[in-house]
Amino acid sequence: MNINEARLKHIEQVLAKRMKTGRFQHTLGVRNAALRMADQFGADREKAAMAALFHDYAKGFNKEELLQTVRLYHLQPDSLMVQAHQLLHGSVAAAIALNEFGIDDDEVLKAIEYHTTGRKHMGTIEKIIYLADFIEEGRDYSGVAFLRELAYRELDLAVYQALTNTMIYVLETGKLLHPNTVEARNHMLNELGERKVNALKKMWEGLYGKDSRNSTGGNYP
Ligand SMILES: [Fe+2]
Ligand SMILES: [Fe+2]
């Protein structure tokens, strides 16, 4: 299916009616951030916008609704996803985008599916959506300005930082950490090399001090 302006506008209008106001505002924030990153890094604007619109479509679903959709579309989540069921809202939203809205673009579907945990070998649209979720204009937490700045300049470094922040948050709050997140972070570290990551750490400490933590739960419940 070809994604164009008219299709995007139509989807935006449908989702505006179905989603809660606050979540829809967040969705538009993610869309705007994703479009800016798409321009910056030469990614497809329409794909970025479409993935952003759908990414949290199922975030308001309760456990039963999530599992119902899992069964309906024969998804095969791992046991940890079922246990920490909020993490399912990405794959459930992707299944709905495909089966109920006819969105069959693989890059878009992967970006929707993996925005909750990340994964290794993320493509550019996936990275953009993963990050846009953390830095959209409505987000306000310690260190968001730094991550925002980084996201529009150094996509991979920013993805690495967002994954690391998420891991710190999950560990500190005693929640279940999904292996996709660990694999994604290790993969980014290997891709970037320790020199680049250490330079980032120095910059970070210069701005926020050694003990500062930019912790945000992201999509971990
Ligand atoms: Fe989400
Ligand atoms: Fe989100």
Image (cartoon, helix red, strand yellow):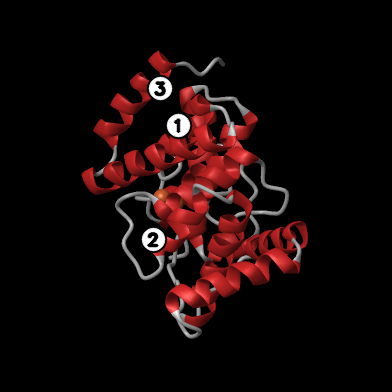
At which x and y percent is residue 107? 62, 33
Task: Judge: label 1 CB < 8 Å from ligand 2.
Answer: no
Q: In this rendered view, identify the residue nearer to me: 26 or 69.
A: 26
Q: Quadrant of residue 106?
A: top right
Residue at the image point whose x is 58% and y is 74% from the top? 202
Residue at the image point whose x is 51% and y is 55% from the top? 150
- The amino acid at mark 1 is Ala
Q: Is residue 70 visible?
A: no
Where does label 1 land, which residue?
Answer: 49
Q: CA distance from mark 2 to mark 3?
A: 29 Å
Mark 3 crowdedness (10 Å alpha carbons): few <14, some 14-19, many ≥20: some
Where does label 2 land, which residue?
Answer: 145
Q: Are marks 1 and 3 in contact (CB under 8 Å)?
A: yes
Answer with left or right where residue 149 lies relative to residue 10: right
Q: CA distance from mark 1 to mark 3?
A: 8 Å
Where does label 3 land, which residue?
Answer: 8
Q: Nearer the viewer, mark 2 or mark 3?
A: 2
- Mark with earlier residue (2, 3): 3
Residue at the image point whose x is 63% and y is 62% from the top? 181
- Mark with earlier residue (2, 1): 1
- The amino acid at mark 3 is Leu
At which x and y percent is residue 42? 59, 31
Mark 2 crowdedness (10 Å alpha carbons): few <14, some 14-19, many ≥20: some
Q: In this rendered view, identify the residue nearer to me: 155 or 136.
A: 155
Residue sticking out furthest to the left: 21
Q: Where is the N terminus found, in terms of image quarters?
A: top right
- Mark with earlier residue (1, 3): 3
Q: Relative to residue 182, is residue 211 depicted above or below?
A: below
